[in-house]
Image (cartoon, rainbow, N blue to C red):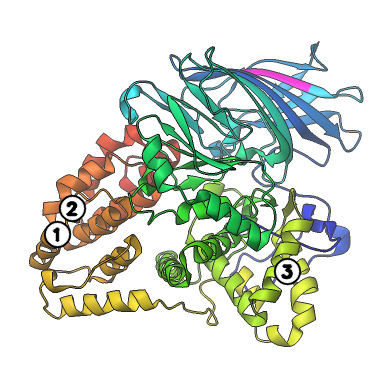
Amino acid sequence: MLKQFTTCLSVAILITSCKSSDKPTTEAPTTKKEEVMHIIDPHSFAKTNDAVVKHLSWKANVDFATKTIQAEAVWTIEKKTNADKVIFDTRDLTIRQVTVNGGQTATYHLADTVSGQSFMGQALTVDIDSTVKTVTINYTTSPGAAALQWLNAQQTKDKKHPFLFTQSQAILCRTWIPTQDGPGTRFTFDATVQVPVGMMALMSAENPQQTATDGIYHFKMEQPIPSYLMSLAVGDLGFQSVGTETGVYAEKSFVAACAEELSDMQTMLEKAEQLYGKYQWGRYDVIVLPPSFPFGGMENPRITFATPTIIAGDKSLVALVAHELAHSWSGNLVTNATWNDFWLNEGFTVYFENRIMEAVYGKDYADMLQVLEYDGLVETVKDFGETNPDTHLKLKLEGRDPDEGVSDIAYNKGAFFLRLLESKVGRAKWDIFINAYFTSNAFKVMTTEAFVEYLNANLIAPNKAAYADVDINAWIYGPGIPSNITKPVSVRFDLVDAQVKKFNEGAAANTLVTTNWTTHEWLRFIYQLPDNTSLEKMGALDKQFKFTGTGNCEIADAWYELAIKAKYTAAYAEMDEFLNSVGRRKFLMPLYKAMINTGQGELAKSIYAKARPGYHYVAQNSLDELVGTK
């Protein structure tokens, strides 16, 4: 997730109050100077223009027996007006006590949940006066807190100790910390966390590399971050360095394999710095989590959370690490002001990720990734519908769970828009612009409108002729895929397509030339096969290439989706096991959707009934309605 800058444009922390039409349009909303006030975040109850949090001191005890965290959050606040209240976002928290200034009893009110918007939780309003500097909230989390994934020992790799990890994005931090839970609000923090003896705790902060003998860990994060980047992981973990500023955490039996797979992290970090400036977060470490983690990765500062599905044994899936590393600039350093501006985080990050991969592994490798991005974008637009407003870069998520904004649109349409801008002036000028954007907006937030204003002033105006045919509004505020998108090409994929053509025309599977293919080439091969591939051909491919039961999750997911569509039931037992052993939403959604769309809904329900308890809330939330459990 990401952004950048270079002038004295302080509107990075402003947002217009104008309303635009509900109809799809290619016209940008106008912004009058007198209407530019402050960020109005539709997914937070906080009124940060009145009173805003600046620092958190957090003390917590992690209780695996009750699956709760008992905690004290001491917030240092800053009043911007003569406000008499400070408002926090909470959800499913039991508030035990609220005090101010270190012990004075406070008057507070916990509102009811808004009807039809349970994802928003409850506003916690605390009365304050001119003397109040700190607010202390003592509370306990719910055993079902949406951000917290409690795993028993059998759900881990080593099966010796339980495990806990958090997922705060988009607005789930409020389920484990009472906070002002919007991406436009930043704060520093320190923490003291008690965990069972023998286990290690990690946070988005300076982290230990050894297990504490007493189970007590101390953390500090001196750079201000938004709530969605707050994280905690507790488990039987080991650490292995892979560079002077980089290292890997994982369960102890797995850490060596993970470190080997991710051994290029230091090189990635150095290449990223060469592209877009100094890394400003100290260390860059990765923790490889148990399989139920619902995403590929989460860019928590200093400690990226990563799915174990990237450990393929051949470094073929490490683009995910490049993506999360890129977020250290785009998203973590310069942050989308609200979730309606989500593309500013993800579009820039996909673009930057590809540049890192090109620098480390070569242009032909990066070209393959771009083609896969393009194909994913086309499929998403087809699935959504070409006029669907959810295919705009600038989203309208008011009244909806912002998690609904997570799609290939923000990621890939955003990246291709930036590549178009780059192509008009060349990489040298573009990189100067991006460097300046990151540097001058470090630790600030960005709205879409502020970015467009900055873009116009600092890149388009000085290069007006080059951008004469670029309709920025069509890309940002319009639906679908603009006609002037540059369709990527890959020489390596051309060779793959030739083998697909050969096979479809009758060549035997064992005659295909596949030597030294990477995961991406295998994905291209499977994706190009027709949905109605005959059972005979499916069996021949499976016999030759051992797709069913492969340990490469990317290939497995693509193959099982094709197997469902072709009704190649020989793969179903392994597909069932796969869906019961991974929790990454990217893999789950296509397979369950394919079963439902091909009249195999009962199969989907039976597998989901078994697998659901092992999935994270984020995955369950996406799948319950799809599969038909509610």
**Disc 1 or 2, which lies upstream in sequence?**
1
Decide if residue 503 is on the left or right side of residue 594. Answer: left
Magenta-highlighted residues? 135-139
For the stretch drawn in magenta, the main secondary structure is strand
Where is residue 520 drawn, in percent x and y? 35, 64
Contact check, label 3 and label 1, Cβ < 8 Å:
no
Instruction: Note whether 563 is above or below 23 in the view shown.
Output: above
Instruction: Please tell me whether residue 137 belongs to the stretch shown in magenta.
Output: yes
Query: For the residue labelled by badge 1, is the local secondary structure a helix, a strand or a loop?
Result: helix
Pick the quarter of the image with the C terminus: top left
Q: Which residue is mark 1?
A: 542
Percent x, y of residue 173: 59, 34
Q: Give coordinates of residue 320: x percent, y percent.
A: 46, 53
Mark before the other along the chain sequence, 3 or 2 = 3
Residue 307 in view? no
Pointer 2 local density, CA inside 10 Å: few below 14, some 14–19, many at least 20: many
Give the side of residue 449 with respect to residue 566, left or right: right
Q: Secondary structure at mark 2?
A: loop
Q: Are marks 3 and 2 in contact (CB under 8 Å)?
A: no
CB within 8 Å, label 1 to label 2:
yes
What residue is shown with label 3? 433
Q: Position of residue 257 (x, y in %)?
A: 36, 41
Q: Give, as a three-letter code, the residue at label 2.
A: Thr
The mark lying in front, picked from 3 and 2, is: 3
